[in-house]
Image (tube, rainbow, N blue to C red):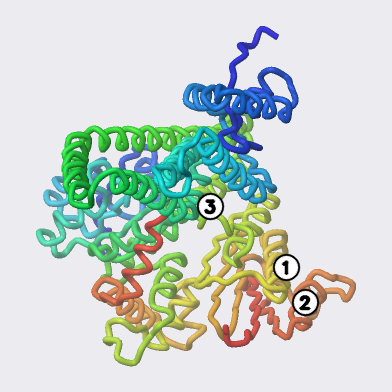
Amino acid sequence: MTQPVRVVLVDDHSMVRAGVRAEIGDAVEIVGEAEDVASAITVIIQTRPDVVLLDVHLPGGGGRAVLDACIEQVPHTRFLALSVSDAAEDVVGVVRGGARGYVTKTITGPELIAAVQRIADGDAVFSPRLAGFVLDAFTGGAAEDDEELDRLTPREREVMRLIARGYTYREVAAELVLSIKTVETHVSAVLRKLQLSDRHELAKWASARHLI
Amino acid sequence: MAQAVRAYRSASGRMVAGVARGLAEHLGLPVALVRLAFVVLAIAGGIGIVLYLALWATLPMQQAEDDEDPRARDRNQLRLVALGAIVLGIALFLAAIGADVVSGAVIPIIIAVIGAALIWQQADDDQRASWSATAARAARQGARSTAAVRTWRLVIGVALLLLGAIGLLVNRTSPAQALQVLGTALLLLAGLAIVAYPWVLRLVRDQQEQRRAFIRSEERAEVAAHVHDSVLQTLALIQRNADDPSEVTRLARSEERALRSWLYAPQGDAERTFAARLQRDAAEVEATFSTSIEVVVVGDAAIDPSLGSLLAATREAMLNAAQHAGSEVSVYAELTPAAVEVFVRDRGAGFELAAVPGDRHGIRESIIGRMERIGGTAEIITSSGQGTEVRLQLQREEAS
């Protein structure tokens, strides 16, 4: 095996950090922990980890503030958002801030390890819920004059739908008769669109959800 | 009987300002008798009128009950008649004491009185409205529907008052003089308005601030009540069941779901849209079988009969998955104007479809039969060891 992935945990609840450490600590190397925005930025810039597991809700500005502060300085570090929140604006906020994926805290240990590995390899990780968000945001009102960034290709849509249905990448690949690598490429493309698109629906949808 | 007995003006069932009815309720006499007394006193030298006006000004208005009398509309018309009668009475009275009703100063005075009465009535109604605002929702609805009426009543009232005053002026003096006086009066009024403006503004702001504070505290109380009923109760249950991990998990999951739906769900139509009902069904199945069900819904629609059947079939599929698979269940529903698709997937043992005995109604009747009856399809993809996925599909007519 190659060197273990170097991970920093950022979460304001020490119980959560302890739990995550217990679940993935054997498979990856945890090089640092932080409990708020300021300490997270310091730790990340000091240790330059491969992957940061980033809580969306943090005292001092949230996960988005951490992303904004260090994504330029540590170009090789990748961020995976970890959250209990279903609120779309939280998820979309960190993903558009540069996170490579989003998983909920109810994820199992082995799944989290796989997700961290995938992020470290430069791929994107979508939970079923995030896939649902994407489909929701990119569905409907699609006019022909939309920018390429503002549309999902039919294949990307199929991949998103299968992920929303709870399929793993491997199962998606089997179902669509693709290689896992191709599935990963599609997911990364969708992530890019989610980050860069200024599709009207995306903004409208996010702001509509904001009004609870 | 130790209750302090205070007289109020009645907010409901009033003819003019509710003085007579309030007094009648206070004294325990029939309303008609009190009204008659006022009329008699009014005729006998006008004391009744003075008394009535004095009581109107001094008696506080009764806090209105929220249930608006359905006959209120009829009564409004009756009240208009009552007001008319009063005006006519004044005119007749003046005529009787020898004033020239038709030409002289009487008509302007009457017009002015009507205007004043309108404004007074409006003030009363506003007072009532600010009470019913205790129910914040009612206030918001009320404000929208009556805002136009209020404005018009005020404008007409002020206009009548001015008209009366001008009439009086013109009547007494030459037109040129009247114009001069009018100008002076307007100037005076403008000056008064400028002086009073900040004070009035502050008064209005204070009232708004009070109302907002009240709504805030109401909301806080509601949140506190909700947290107490749900979260705190569940936490207590979890402590009591601390040595039963599966029960703790079940409690935590169901509470989490309940709290989430309370926080994030769209308000109001929680039971009428497909997504909300699906979430609720999933929560129920989850609570029954201690499994976790992840629900992702794209799009939404109001529930119609065929969507209702689809929901029932989905529920059955979730029950099967939760019951037999014993693993996490994923539910994905996508609603477009053209079609609805639902996928219920588990990672359990799976089963051989052909091996299911014919008397098992679960799948054949509740899922496949139900879907066929509404013109949809149900597909079950499974084999031992692979988990199961139920795919439900329903074409919809293009949304009109």
Q: Look at mark 2 in the image and give the residue it sits on.
A: B370
Residue B309 lies, with reference to residue B97, above or below; the image says: below
User: Which numbered disc, 2 or 1, marks the residue that appears first in the sequence?
Assistant: 1
Q: Nearer the viewer, residue A15 or A102?
A: A102
* Label 2 with label 1: CB-CB less than 8 Å: yes
Residue reaching furthest to the top? B2
Q: Is residue B293 above or below residue A123?
A: above
**Residue B122 shows in this picture:** no
Q: Residue furthest right?
A: B359
Task: Identify residue type, mark 3.
Answer: Ser
| Disc 2 residue type (three-letter) | Arg
The secondary structure type at the circle numbered 3 is helix
Instruction: Tell me the residue at 63%/26% (across/down).
Output: B38
- Residue B173 in percent (x, y) is at 25, 45
Q: Residues within 10 Å of mark 3 (few under 14, many from 20)?
A: some
Residue occupying the point 58% across, 37% down: B16
Label 3 marks which chain's residue? B
Q: Quadrant of the C terminus of chain B?
A: bottom right
Which corner quadrant holds the N terminus of chain B? top right
Using the image, name the chain to which the residue with label 1 belongs.
B
Please state the chain letter of the residue tagged with numbered disc 2 in the rendered image.
B
Badges 3 and 2: C-beta atoms under 8 Å apart? no
- Disc 1 designates what residue? B312
* Residue at 47% across, 54% down: B149
Side of B256 relative to A152 (left or right): right
